[in-house]
Image: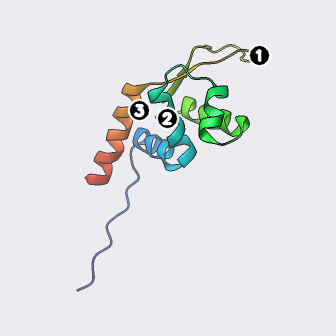
Amino acid sequence: MPHERPELVAPPERAAAAHQAVAVESRLATLRFLLENPGATVQELVPVLGISAQSTRANLAELEAAGFVTTDAGDGPRNGKVVRYRVDRERFTTDLLAFVAWVLR
């Protein structure tokens, strides 16, 4: 008897954002490092991640846009400023749990 293919239903938006955050190894490593080292800078992340500063900034921008990473820089220009990054642990945990709940539904 053939198995019926389950209907593919897209995850909720926030759950999908959490999946995107952890789907790329360098973003996952960024999150893990920031969870253990809140307030880290790009200069501190680069040698740990083993990727360029430009790629590190791109990862941080994606994580910040998703709401998983916050900075001490506010909304103003960042040129020449040392920016410190932190994981919004509550938001990330909530959204990641929503993704797991969607997978296990």
Q: Earlier in the sequence, mark 3 or mark 1?
A: 1
Q: What amino acid is at disc 3?
A: Phe
Q: What amino acid is at disc 1?
A: Gly
Furthest residue in direction bottom, as rendered: 1
Contact? badges 3 and 2 (CB < 8 Å): yes
Residue in view at x 54 percent, y 36 percent: 30
Q: Earlier in the sequence, mark 3 or mark 2?
A: 2
Residue 98, image x and y in percent? 33, 41
- The residue singled out by tag 1 in the image is 80
Q: Nearer the viewer, mark 3 or mark 2?
A: 2
Which of the colour schemes (rainbow, by chain, secondary structure, one colour) is used? rainbow
**Separation of disc 3 and disc 2 at Cα?**
10 Å
Element assignment for label 2: helix
Q: Residues within 10 Å of mark 2 (few under 14, many from 20)?
A: many
Residue 67 seen: no
Element assignment for label 1: loop
Q: Quadrant of the N terminus?
A: bottom left
Furthest residue in direction front, as rendered: 47
Horizontal side, residue 69 vs residue 94: left or right: right
Residue 57 seen: yes
- The residue singled out by tag 2 in the image is 31
Give 69 or 34, whichever is nearer the viewer.
Answer: 34
- The residue singled out by tag 3 in the image is 92
Image vertical order of residue 69 relative to residue 52, above or below: above
Q: Earlier in the sequence, mark 2 or mark 1?
A: 2
Residue in view at x 49 percent, y 22 percent: 38
Contact? badges 3 and 1 (CB < 8 Å): no
Residue in view at x 36 percent, y 45 percent: 99
Give 52 or 1, whichever is nearer the viewer.
Answer: 52
Residue 103, image x and y in percent? 32, 53
